[in-house]
């Protein structure tokens, strides 16, 4: 029985890997053996960093909220405690946007948190 060398499965698999490696530097984009390793590693980085991105954005939002809280004479942790006691459920992304775009509205949210802390 003859040996199949130019099989479509094989060429499709290689083509898929090389397409994913498009734009990589040097042989990593043209040589299948190198591209296979590079694409695998790139996939690992992408998987890891999709999760890390969520952490990074949360840190950014907290830093922005904290900076605006200090302008309103309250710490971030006391602010969040006050929001929880007052029953305000607003996420950190929205609070961050509020702090950047509308300082007056954020000040009202801070006042709500402060009043909940005092009672």
Image (cartoon, helix red, strand yellow):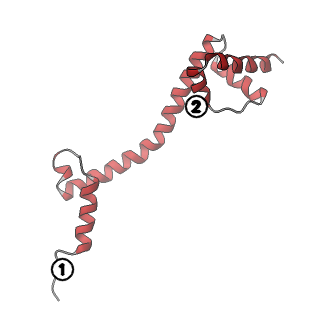
| Label 2 SS | helix
Q: Is residue 38 left or right of residue 75?
A: left
**SS at circle 1:** loop
Residue drawn where x is 32% and y is 49% of the image = 41
Is 96 or 63 nearer to us in this picture?
Answer: 96
Q: Is residue 19 above or below residue 102?
A: below
Q: Is residue 95 left or right of residue 32?
A: right
Q: Residues within 10 Å of mark 2 (few under 14, many from 20)?
A: some
Query: Is 102 in front, or is 62?
Result: 102
Decide which of tag 2 and tag 1 comes sooner along the chain.
1
Residue displayed at 27% across by 59% down: 17
- The x and y percentages for residue 114 are 75, 17
Kindly report which numbered mark, 2 or 1, lies closer to the viewer in this rendering. 2
Query: Which residue matches tag 1?
Result: 4
List x then y, in percent, for residue 35.
23, 54
Viewer-closest of 47 and 24: 24
**How many callouts does the rendering have?**
2
Q: Which residue is mark 2?
A: 93
Look at 74% across and 23% down and name the residue there. 82
Lateral position of residue 42 relative to residue 83, left or right: left
> Badge 1: how crowded within 10 Å, few (<14), some, or many (20+)?
few
Q: Residue furthest bottom?
A: 1
Task: Name the quarter where the C terminus is drawn.
Answer: top right
Res 102 quadrant in image: top right
Quadrant of the rendered structure where residue 107 is?
top right
**Mark 2–mark 1 distance (CA, rounded to whole Å):** 57 Å
Whole-percent x, y for residue 93 in the image = 58, 31
Q: Position of residue 106 (x, y in %)?
A: 65, 20
């Amino acid at each position: 029985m003859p040996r199949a060398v130019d099989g479509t499965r094989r060429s499709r698999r290689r083509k898929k890997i090389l397409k994913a490696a498009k734009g990589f530097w040097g042989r990593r984009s043209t040589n299948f053996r190198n591209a296979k390793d590079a694409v695998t590693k790139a996939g690992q980085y992408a998987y890891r960093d999709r999760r890390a991105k969520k952490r990074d954005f949360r840190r950014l939002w907290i830093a922005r909220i904290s900076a605006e809280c200090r302008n309103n004479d309250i710490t971030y942790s006391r602010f969040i405690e006050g929001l929880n006691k007052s029953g305000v459920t607003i996420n950190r992304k929205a609070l961050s946007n509020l702090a950047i775009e509308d300082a007056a509205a954020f000040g009202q949210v801070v006042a709500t948190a402060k009043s909940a802390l005092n009672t």
